[in-house]
């Protein structure tokens, strides 16, 4: 279980990835080793490769949307078996004893292990985690498409569950990209009336294909004004500044503007925009293991999967360049071709 793992790593910020072998520590008593078949690429991988958040350690093996089969288990790993198909997302472990963990909110554990922060991730032939974050895949889900569910998918699914979004709610999704297109699919299957906000007119037909009933130009003040007071929940998946006052005005009384996209500039929120309609502004990271399991079951039941583009892992730099150039439609997935 300590044999070398072949991977692709960046040795400095913004460097091309190169082949990298490393010997992992002994598999812990509650550890799981996954033989990777597929791994999605997320913008967070680019951020870690480039050290945009200041917490990258080099050489770094990124990749946190890994899918594969269990190749080894620690003696105290629970509920899993060797050979089982599982997926691993951003989180690789939690303390399992703090108030957040004991309440089932392992994703909020202050001592949580993150798959590619201070550890090596899924741009490799194998990856390791605690058993609680190795989530079994329902038989109906395709391994080639499932990886992005463990980060992008869970990020947008968790607020639907945590804020008790109802099938009768009118929900807006801002940004039709890697996160947004999955949110549209989830919300349509949930039963909501779904409005897509996009600054790209060419995405309108695609947005409707993903599940939007309505499409609104997010960069047109008149379009936003016409829907004022109409939405119960708006999910922001973009990382760019927009007219947030107009977005708040689009909410109905008791509505919520919720961020899962890491908008890089401060978001101005006038107090009266909240007070007059008892509106809320919030944000969230990924969901818990229990929420992730709910999401996977929901995807299997409703035949939901992200729209993906496939690259062999040996062409990882071409895949990263494709994502950097904004050409991904809508998630990029690597297929393990180590020989």
Image (cartoon, rainbow, N blue to C red):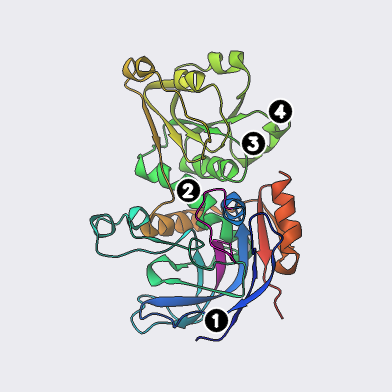
Q: Is residue 193 above or below residue 272?
A: below
Which numbered disc covers residue 23?
A: 1
Q: CA distance from mark 3 to mark 2?
A: 19 Å
Between disc 2 and disc 1, whose residue precedes?
Answer: 1
Q: Residue at x 51, y 79 (%)?
A: 24
Badge nearest the viewer, 2 or 1: 1
- Label 1: which secondary element: loop
Q: CA distance from mark 2 to mark 1?
A: 31 Å
Badge nearest the viewer, 2 or 4: 2
Tell me the magenta residue range. Answer: 51-68
Which numbered disc covers residue 155?
A: 2
Instruction: Tell whether position 241 is magenta.
Output: no
Closer to us: 326 or 230: 326
Mark 3 sits on what residue? Answer: 207
- Label 4: which secondary element: helix
User: Where, by quadrant of the figure, is residue 281 drawn?
Assistant: top left
Q: Residue at x 73, y 32 (%)?
A: 202
Q: Residue at x 68, y 38 (%)?
A: 206
Between disc 2 and disc 4, whose residue precedes?
Answer: 2
Measured as percent of width and height from the top left, residue 308 is found at 67, 54
């Amino acid at each position: 279980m300590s044999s070398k793992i072949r991977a692709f790593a960046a040795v400095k910020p913004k460097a091309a990835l190169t082949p990298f072998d490393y010997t992992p520590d002994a598999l812990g008593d509650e550890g799981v080793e996954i033989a990777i078949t597929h791994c999605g690429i997320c913008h967070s991988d680019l951020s870690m490769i480039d050290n945009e958040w200041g917490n990258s350690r080099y050489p770094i093996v990124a990749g946190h949307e890994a899918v594969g089969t269990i190749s080894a288990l620690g003696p105290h790993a629970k509920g899993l078996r060797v050979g089982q198909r599982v997926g691993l997302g951003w989180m690789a472990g939690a303390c399992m004893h703090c108030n957040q963990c004991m309440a089932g909110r392992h994703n909020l554990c202050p001592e949580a292990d993150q798959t590619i922060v201070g550890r090596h991730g899924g741009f490799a032939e194998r990856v390791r985690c605690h058993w609680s974050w190795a989530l079994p895949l329902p038989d109906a889900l395709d391994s080639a498409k499932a990886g992005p569910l463990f980060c992008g998918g869970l990020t947008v699914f968790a607020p639907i569950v945590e804020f008790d979004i109802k099938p009768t709610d009118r929900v807006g999704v801002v940004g039709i990209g890697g996160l947004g297109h999955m949110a549209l699919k989830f919300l349509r299957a949930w039963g909501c009336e779904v409005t897509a906000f996009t600054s790209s007119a060419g995405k309108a037909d695609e947005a409707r294909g993903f599940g939007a009933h309505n499409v609104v130009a997010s960069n047109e003040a008149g379009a936003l004004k016409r829907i004022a007071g109409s939405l119960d929940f708006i999910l922001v998946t973009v990382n760019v500044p927009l007219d947030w006052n107009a977005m708040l005005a689009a909410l109905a009384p008791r509505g919520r503007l919720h961020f899962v996209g890491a908008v890089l500039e401060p978001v101005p929120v006038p107090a009266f925009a909240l007070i007059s309609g008892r509106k809320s502004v919030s944000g969230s990271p990924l969901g818990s293991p229990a929420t992730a399991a709910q999401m996977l079951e929901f995807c299997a039941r409703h035949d939901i999967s992200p729209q993906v583009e496939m690259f062999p892992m040996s062409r990882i730099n071409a895949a990263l360049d494709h994502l950097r150039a904004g050409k991904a439609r809508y998630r990029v997935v690597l297929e393990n071709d180590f020989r």
